[in-house]
Image (tube, grey):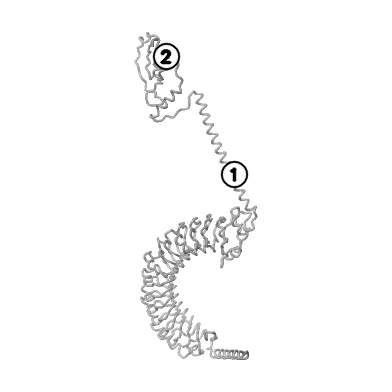
Amino acid sequence: MALGILRCSVLVAMVTVVCWMDVVSSCPSSCNCFQDNYGTTVQCQNSVISSVISGLPINTKRLEILSAQGASTLSQATFDGGNIGTINNLLIQGSRIQSINDNTFSKFSNLNNLNLTHNSIRSITKNAFAGLNRLATLDLSSNDLQQIADEFVPLIQLQNLDLSSNSITSIQNGAFSAQVILNNLRLDSNKLQAIHGHSFQGLVNLRKLSIRNCGLHSLASDLFNIIRHLQTLDIGDNLIYQLPSTETFQHIPAALQHFIADGNQISVLVRHQFSRMNLLTLDLSRNRISFLSHASFAECNVRNLYLSSNSITGIEENAFASLAPQLERLVLSKNPLRSIPLHVFDGLYRLIYLNLSTCSLTKLEDLQFQSLQSLRSLDLSINSLQYIPKTAVSKFINLQELGLYGNEWHCDCHIRPLWNWLKGFVQGILLCPIGATAAKYSNCKTPMCESPTNVKNLAVSSLSKQNIQACQDKDDQETMSVGVIIGLALGSMAVIILFGILVVCICRHRHGRPLPAICTANSTASSHKEDREKSTTPFKDMDIGSLNESDKDFVVKRYFRSMENQPTSVASYRGTPSLSHKEFDFDGSCPSIHSVNSVFNGPIGYESTV
């Protein structure tokens, strides 16, 4: 049994060697041939195509020709006389091909993949691809095509078409009408400037359309009426300054999952711009957006949102509220934010990745990340942070990635939460930059103190408790000093006020004047007068004592006091009675009864019998 197995193994090895020798012996000059599980692959360089074709081994599956000689025009004769019927993958690159004539590939009956990239193709006849009934992928990128008409009519099985990096300025209506199963169309880096829905008639199964860097200023309103099953739309690196209206976007395919519009000139997101969209990816990075309102993403579901490299300076606190059920990745890096509202991340319980790097942040609010229950990656690198609040540091426990490099850590008592965390963290979670900036942040895994000067360039984790406590002592002293100053100021003011009142009282007492009362309205005048009269000691006069006891009116008192005891004096008086209005009563506007000129100045007699 074992001997039989051994003999079979030897036989297989011998057959393999013979086949390999046959392949090598029949390999065209200037080519390399090798065998794999998929058949024979032939790789040639700087060869004449016709010579390569005539010397192909049997069962060749893949033919690659680089920098072919004398191949400015491809025709049917170019591929005559060889074993090309088994080839399913043909690549001719960098060969300066300029034109392709009718029926050039008609004998490639099993060809599945045709790559003619990096040539100079400018002309393709209508039937150039006739006979390629099984062709699924065609790459014509990096050529010099200027317009698309009916070149692809024979390619009814085409699924992937790459026309990027040409000079295409126009696409004829119905140019792709025969490609009913086309899934992927790339038109990047052309000179289209404008594009219309009718150019894509027939592409009923198109899933991905890429029109990057084509000088587009806008999207045609009928584009989404034609392409109904689109899943990915990439319009990045154009000159679009405004996205289609909300009404136009309402016709966007329900199947759309990736909308990429990075590198444009979009400055404003209108209200409900993405209403009723259910996206996996929304990329608006590298635009000119300056503000995010609560209506920017209203009624929209997005899983990955990219807003980096804009001009965002303000974000409303509920700007991302409607995205809460789906949002898992949020990139806000390279925006001049400086600060972030406290509740801007509230409700984002599914957020896993948050990038706030290079945002000129000077501080983080307490409880800033409180709602981010699922956060696993946080990038705070290249900001101006001096410390991180304790509640924010508490979120670091669940992180798998954290970027802290490039900040301005001020190592006093406020750095204590970060200092405590660095004492026990897993160093592998700290992120480091890649590429050109890697050398600049060589200490990316060891946050360094930037200030005060006594700890500058020390690792935060190496600080002593004395370094951290010093700030607290200073704060306590400053607090006490402020309290003492305030107490002294209030005490001094109280002393000055009391001293002023005392001086006024003494001065009035020396001049025999009481402190003035405040005159109120006439409705209360009588009450003031009554109070004053009640507090005045009744006038005592033995001769008119009975009147003083029964009458409190001063006029009556004055009247009797002014009487003369000698009736003869009354007879001898010759003056004219007068009533002065120069003095007024304290409580009213009537002539004062206290004035010496306000009563009759003549003598009045009275008899003791009264």
Marks 2 and 1 close (CB-CB < 8 Å)? no
In the picture of the structure, the residue carrying the numbered disc 2 is 544
Q: Position of residue 92 (x, y in %)?
A: 48, 82
State the image quarter where residue 238 is shown. Answer: bottom left
Relative to residue 559, is residue 63 depicted above or below?
below
Pick the front one: 453 or 94: 453
Mark 2 / mark 1, whichever is N-terminal:
1
Q: Position of residue 509 (x, y in %)?
A: 51, 25
Dot 1 surroundings within 10 Å: few (below 14), some, or many (20 or more)?
few
Pick the front one: 133 or 370: 370
Q: In front of the other: label 2 or label 1? A: 2
Q: Which mark is residue 480?
A: 1
Q: Position of residue 48 (x, y in %)?
A: 49, 87
State the image quarter where residue 151 is shown. Answer: bottom left
Looking at the image, residue 461 sits to the left or right of residue 599; the answer is right
Pick the front one: 46 or 374: 374
Q: What kind of residue is marked 1? A: Met
